[in-house]
Image (cartoon, helix red, strand yellow):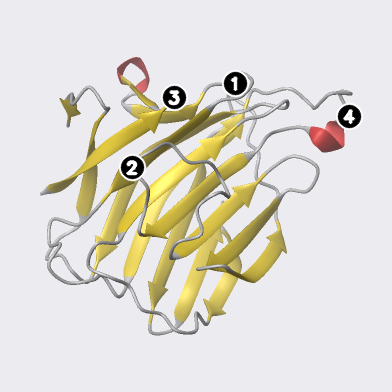
């Protein structure tokens, strides 16, 4: 059983590349996102494990071409009350947000509501044709754990006042600015306590085309 998802902004499925989800192209001023919820929407999801592959690559290196400015702006994973519009890597503050940020300082940040809980430096960009980075984000009794490209970057992080709501959904968002990258997701799945089995995501855009 797969949950139903909606794309916003410039996000699109790329059938010619195995159904990968491109959140943004490597062009200036792009924004794209995807949102999806559990089929069991009667009760809030208290624990989950999201697994996906991510590649951020192919972009320019800022206004002046400096290597330290390569990439922009990044991708976020969200679990909260999400807007019915495109959002980027750091502009939604509802619920839990894990932002994988590129540019001058590659890092992973964790926020809950409007409070930053952690910020960790990490090497995030994977220039094509290198393989995607495998990412796992999980929350449960031992807190929040994040594995990026085989490295445990956040371990057992406590999220105070954890209080998911039934209307909360999962999502990803990405953005480019004057610096750019292509932001691509693949093999996305979420296992949660509100479902009997693993959720694999089927997608529609705002034109309501459903893909499996």
Q: Position of residue 6 (x, y in %)?
A: 27, 37
Horizontal relation, residue 189 to residue 104: left or right: left
Sequence-earlier tag: 3 or 1 = 3
Sequence-earlier tag: 2 or 3 = 3
Horizontal relation, residue 179 to residue 129: left or right: right
Which element carries disc 1, helix, strand or loop?
loop
Q: Position of residue 110 (x, y in %)?
A: 58, 64
Q: Residue at x 50, y 70 (%)?
A: 145
Horizontal relation, residue 172 to residue 122: left or right: left
**Label 4 vs label 3, nearer the camera:** 3
User: Looking at the rendering, in which quadrant would you find the C terminus?
Assistant: top left
Badge 1 local density, few (<14 within 10 Å), some, or many (20+)?
many
Q: Residue at x 59, y 34 (%)?
A: 56
**Label 1 vs label 2, nearer the camera:** 2
**Label 2 vs label 4, nearer the camera:** 2
Which element carries disc 3, helix, strand or loop?
loop
**Label 2 vs label 3, nearer the camera:** 2
Q: Say whether marks 3 and 1 touch (CB < 8 Å).
A: no
Q: Residue at x 58, y 50 (%)?
A: 90
Can see residue 77? yes
Give the residue at mark 1.
Answer: 26
Q: Position of residue 112 (x, y in %)?
A: 51, 69
Can see residue 132? no
Query: Residue 66: which numbered mark, if any?
Result: 4
Give the residue at mark 2.
Answer: 84
Badge 2 local density, few (<14 within 10 Å), some, or many (20+)?
few
Q: CA distance from mark 2 to mark 4?
A: 36 Å
Q: Position of residue 37 (x, y in %)?
A: 24, 53
Sequence-earlier tag: 2 or 4 = 4
Horizontal relation, residue 184 to residue 16: left or right: right
Sequence-earlier tag: 4 or 1 = 1
């Amino acid at each position: 059983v797969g949950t139903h998802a909606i794309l916003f902004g410039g996000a699109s499925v790329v059938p010619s590349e195995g159904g990968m989800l491109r959140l943004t192209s490597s062009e200036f001023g792009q924004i794209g996102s995807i949102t999806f919820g559990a089929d069991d929407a009667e009760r809030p999801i208290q624990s989950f494990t999201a697994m996906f592959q991510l590649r951020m690559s192919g972009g320019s290196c800022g206004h002046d071409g400096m290597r330290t400015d390569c990439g922009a702006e990044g991708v976020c994973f969200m679990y909260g009350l999400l807007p019915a519009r495109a959002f980027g890597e750091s502009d939604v503050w509802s619920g839990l947000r894990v932002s994988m940020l590129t540019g001058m300082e590659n890092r992973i940040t964790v926020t809950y509501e409007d409070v930053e809980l952690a910020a960790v430096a990490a090497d995030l960009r994977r220039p094509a044709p290198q393989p995607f980075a495998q990412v796992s984000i999980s929350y449960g009794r031992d807190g929040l754990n994040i594995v990026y490209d085989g490295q445990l970057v956040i371990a057992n992080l406590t999220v105070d006042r954890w209080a998911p709501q039934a209307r909360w959904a999962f999502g990803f968002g990405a953005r480019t600015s004057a610096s750019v990258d292509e932001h691509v997701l693949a093999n996305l799945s979420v296992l949660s306590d509100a479902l009997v089995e693993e959720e694999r995501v089927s997608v529609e855009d705002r034109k309501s085309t459903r893909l499996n």
